[in-house]
């Protein structure tokens, strides 16, 4: 859960006018510390109240700024990229697909597990089939094993997100041949710390070490 008073919360604001003349004021940020990691985004469009409802988030996504889209997709996930109530939410999504097997429910599972490559989707489909055919008692073990295998990818994606947000801050977002630059605000603006990005990556590395040693119980493997 995001703590707005956290000293490790990175807050930014990005003001954009899209090609239709709509004016966006986008407030976004993240915290990679162990105690209250998370992500947020809220926006005001054409002077509306700042909010983070689904309609607003979809309009922000329509700007097609990759790092911002990744951030929105990461809302509700911690420093490891794992969603809140991981097992419970996975069970609900699997149940929804089983009772109503359609592309939307399958897509919800793909997004939940961030299984976007062709091979990942093949593995996901194989898991769904195995889970569906398993007895109610066996399903817990099938799900637990698959959840563990996805966690390595989820934390790798988390690092990629923070890198993408860093690039966005350094190079800005180009909309309709105009470049818009984010600005730091909040605690980081009042207490400048030039090495905050390095610290964030270190938080993720520590979380990865902890994931391997305490959850996966296997030898740690680093990533670039």
Image: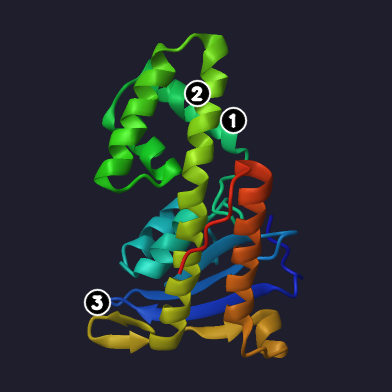
Q: Of the residues under marks 2 and 3, which one precedes in the sequence?
A: 3
Q: Where, quadrant-wise, is the N terminus in this rendering?
A: bottom right
Q: Residue at 35%, 20% (x, y): give it.
A: 129
Could you classify mark 2 by the number of other residues whose Cα lies within 10 Å: few (under 14), some (14-19), or many (20 or more)? some
Q: Where, quadrant-wise, is the C terminus in this rendering?
A: bottom left
Q: CA distance from mark 2 to mark 3?
A: 48 Å
- Residues marked 2 and 3 touching at CB (< 8 Å): no
Q: Residue at 39%, 62% (x, y): give it.
A: 69
Q: Of the residues under marks 2 and 1, which one precedes in the sequence?
A: 1
- Residue 142 at what x, y percent from top left? 50, 23
Helix, strand or loop status at disc 2? helix
Name the residue at the top extreme: 135
* Residue with the mark numbered 2: 142
Visible in this render: residue 35? yes
Q: CA distance from mark 2 to mark 1?
A: 14 Å
* Residue with the mark numbered 1: 88
Residue 4 falls in image quadrant:
bottom right
Vertical relation: 133 (above or below) 75? above
Q: Residue at 28%, 87% (x, y): give it.
A: 178
Q: Is residue 58 left or right of residue 103?
A: right
- Residue 29 at what x, y percent from top left? 57, 70
């Amino acid at each position: 859960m995001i703590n707005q008073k956290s000293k490790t919360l990175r807050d930014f604001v990005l003001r954009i006018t899209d090609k239709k003349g709509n004016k966006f004021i986008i407030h976004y940020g993240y915290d990679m510390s162990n105690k209250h990691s998370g992500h947020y985004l809220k926006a005001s469009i054409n002077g509306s109240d700042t909010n983070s409802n689904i309609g607003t988030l979809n309009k922000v996504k329509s700007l097609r700024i990759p790092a911002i889209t990744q951030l929105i997709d990461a809302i509700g996930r911690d420093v490891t990229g794992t969603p809140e109530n991981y097992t419970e939410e996975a069970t609900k999504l699997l149940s929804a697909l089983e009772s109503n097997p359609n592309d939307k429910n399958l897509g919800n599972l793909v997004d939940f597990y961030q299984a976007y490559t062709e091979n990942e989707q093949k593995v996901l489909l194989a898991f769904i089939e195995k889970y569906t055919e398993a007895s109610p008692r066996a399903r817990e073990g099938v799900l637990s094993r698959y959840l563990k295998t996805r966690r390595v990818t989820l934390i790798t994606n988390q690092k990629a997100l923070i890198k993408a947000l860093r690039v966005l801050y350094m190079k800005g977002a180009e909309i309709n041949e105009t470049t818009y630059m984010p600005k730091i605000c909040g605690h980081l603006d009042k207490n400048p710390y030039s090495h905050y990005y390095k610290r964030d990556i270190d938080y993720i590395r520590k979380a990865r070490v902890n994931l391997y040693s305490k959850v996966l119980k296997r030898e740690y493997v680093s990533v670039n």
